[in-house]
Image (cartoon, helix red, strand yellow):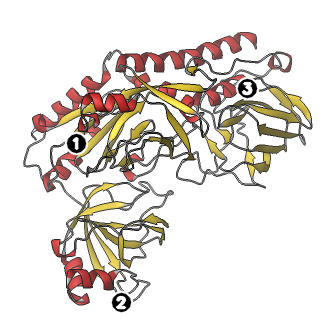
Amino acid sequence: MQENVVNWQALGEQAVILQWPQYHADVTSQIMQLVQSLQQSPFAGFVESVPAFQSLSIHFDLSEMGTVIDPHPFVADYVKQLMKSVPSHYISKSRKIEIPVFYDDSPDLAELCRLSGLSRERWIELHTSAEYTVVCVGFAPGFPYLAGLPEALQMPRRAEPRLHVQAGSVAIGGAYCGIYPQQSPGGWHIVGRTQVCLFDAAQQPPALLQTGDKVHFRAVRERVE
Amino acid sequence: MAVEIVQFGAPASLQNFGQTGLRAYGVTVGGVMDKDSAAIPNLLVGNEVEAAVIEFTQPGLTVRFLQDAWVAVGGAQMSVTLDGSEISMWRAVFVERGCVLRCALNGDGVWAYLAVAGGFCFANDGAITSDRGVVSGMRLSIATDGHHSTGTSLNPKRMTQMRAQPPQRNRQRIQRDGGTTVHLIRVLPGEHVSLWPTALFADWFKQPFRVSHQRNRIGYRLEGKPLPLNTNLPSQPVVAGTVQLPPSGLPIVLQADCQTIGGYPVIAHVIEADLGAMAQVGAGQLVCFQEVTMEMARAAWMRQRMDWQQLKVGLACCR
């Protein structure tokens, strides 16, 4: 793994943030590999790491850092050493998850078809034939940002966000696809609904989808699977 | 074995020092908004600093005790009565079963804390993913297993002498001509300040900002002269204390319940020792940011923990 292209900065007193210069598919797998390496061989004081689009934050506990005087460069060096030991052509073993979607329950699909010049059938066909990668989970507990939306379907976010988006809404925003795990405000176009539970606090881990997972959508005719 | 919530000022919640380990799934850390103001009442009743407390705000909180308990309140300025008679903040008070404790915020500060000996229990093992909201009629249990207690048995004669000063060290403020108060909040530089010419940004950032009414446990909006900029950055991890600059050009200071990732430029981070001071600045009041080095921030963090330790040891000697 090329550790020299990655920059680091302090994220407050108790975290380091690593930044990749640009996003591409390899970045997500590099980030996930680092997340796993850190879990397997954490430094003393390591708390957790948080993947995002082209960055990874590494959180530590100042009171557990022992004799380390300057923790930020120490953590950055530690991570860069970990990166060196990872082969650059590492292929991660991604989980594959299928999400059934009821496309008939969509307030925005007709408008999206009109704007993109695609028939409804073609739009759904493109949406269901693509493979998506979870690049990060955030915005709300369990909300996955999915890369891999076909270019023909990409659309800027709504000018006016909705105050209430139903739980289970499958949506697109810009180049990404997402699924709202809970009812929340949201600015993305809703293309359908799923019955799949994306976040359950009682489960370990609580989120169904994790960074690095591969996702497919499957069209269903009935609301309940 | 419990207390019953009679009345509260929204939003009241049960908080400890937050929960890490789930940020990668989009779950916020949470925890009290002002650690000093929760730590001191906890120490006064013999708990560890991070034991679960009830955090509340305007107009206040009314609680009926269904059991005997030692309690202490701290945080925002308030009048506290026990069955109608006034009691002091920042000291341990014995509450008999059936008594009603009434706290009414009436001055400086935003967030207030009620600690009980033993600490409150979370319904779901303290998991932040469970509902922490406090509502009228709700009954909250007090821990009896001593999990959060420092292990000292409570001697009633000595307990009544347990008192402490409100937090002072990390609460810097200056009086300006005309009597306005400006809260000084120490910050570390943010990574996106290089998006602006250095002098332009520094000049803008030194203005006093006014805390907006748009504020909650997620973030505080600030008002002042805007510094607009149109950028499109990929979302990246953020933490409580991160100061973001949305397209409006007016900063948002992220707080305890902030999202795990954010896409606005990061212009500063409030140092951890000053997060409580920032949270306690009321709407309409002024803050000035003061840049410090990482060494200074770490020293302040260390000092804050030493103060808690010193109070803990001091109180233990009196017991």
- Kindly indicate whether the residues beneath marks 1 and 3 are on one polypeptide chain: no
Q: Nearer the viewer, residue A160 or A55?
A: A160
Kind of residue indicated by mark 3? Val
How far across and how far down the image is residue A184, in percent?
48, 64
Looking at the image, residue B315 sits to the left or right of residue B69; the answer is left
Kind of residue indicated by mark 1? Leu
Q: Residue at image x 27%, y 42%? A: A56
Return the residue at label 3. B45
| Circle 1 Cα neighbour tier, 10 Å, few/some/many (<14 / 14–19 / ≥20) | many
Up-down relation of residue B257 to residue B300 (above or below):
below
- Kindly indicate whether the residues beneath marks 3 and 2 are on one polypeptide chain: no
| SS class, disc 3 | loop
Residue B215 in view (yes/no):
no
Looking at the image, residue A19 sits to the left or right of residue B243; the answer is left
Kind of residue indicated by mark 2? Arg
Which quarter shows the C terminus of chain A? bottom left
Question: Residue A102 sits in which quadrant?
Answer: bottom left
Return the residue at label 1. A34
* Residue B193: mark in rendering: none
Q: Nearer the viewer, residue B243 or B117?
A: B243
C-alpha gap between disc 2 and disc 1: 40 Å
C-alpha gap between disc 3 and disc 2: 60 Å
Up-down relation of residue A135 to residue A153 (above or below):
above
- Kindly indicate whether the residues beneath marks 2 and 1 are on one polypeptide chain: yes
Residue A68 in view (yes/no):
yes
| Circle 3 Cα neighbour tier, 10 Å, few/some/many (<14 / 14–19 / ≥20) | many
Return the residue at label 2. A221
